[in-house]
Image (tube, rainbow, N blue to C red):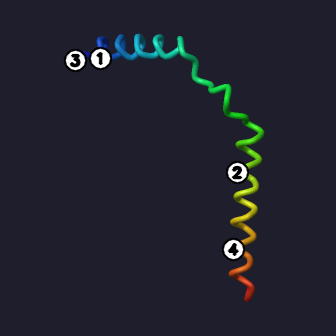
Amino acid sequence: MSLHSAAAQLVTLAAEGEEHGGNHDSISALATGGGAFIILMLLLWITTRFNRDR
């Protein structure tokens, strides 16, 4: 397999992927970011409860 044929196959594969779209409408960026923030704050709170001596 040459470099040119491999590149041509990758271009074809990328063009097929554009038809379906890469973004999911069901995933809300605000909900994902808010959920991650809450989880990180919870982990920070748990960590500080275990390190009371500092």
Judged from this view, the residue extending furthest toward the left is: 1
Distance between the alpha carbons at the discs numbered 2 and 1? 42 Å
> Do the numbered discs 4 and 1 sit on residues whose CB atoms are within 8 Å?
no
Percent position of residue 10, x then y: 39, 17
Residue 1's label in the rendered image is 3
Quarter holding the C terminus? bottom right
The quarter of the displayed image where residue 23 is located: top right
* Label 1: which secondary element: helix
**Which residue lies under the disc numbered 1?**
3
Q: Amino acid at mark 4?
A: Thr
The answer to whether marks 2 and 1 mark residues whose Cβ atoms lie closer than 8 Å is no
Q: Kindly state the secondary structure of the residue where label 3 is placed.
A: loop
For marks 2 and 3, give the one nearer the viewer.
2
Amino acid at the residue labelled 1: Leu
Q: Nearer the viewer, residue 36 or 4?
A: 36
The answer to whether the residue labelled 2 contacts the one labelled 3, judged by CB atoms less than 8 Å apart, is: no
Tags 4 and 3 touching, CB below 8 Å: no
Residue 22 lies left or right of residue 25; in this view the side is left
Q: Which residue occupies 70% across, 42% down?
A: 32
Label 2 sits on residue: 36
User: How many circles with numbers are drawn on the protein?
Assistant: 4
In primary-sequence order, the first of circles 2 and 1 is: 1
- Residue type beneath disc 3: Met
The image position of residue 5, as x and y in percent, is 29, 12
Q: Amino acid at mark 2?
A: Ala
4 or 1: tag closer to the N-terminus = 1
Q: Within 10 Å of the Cα at label 3, are there few (<14), some (14-19), or many (20+) other Cα atoms?
A: few
- Badge nearest the viewer, 3 or 1: 3
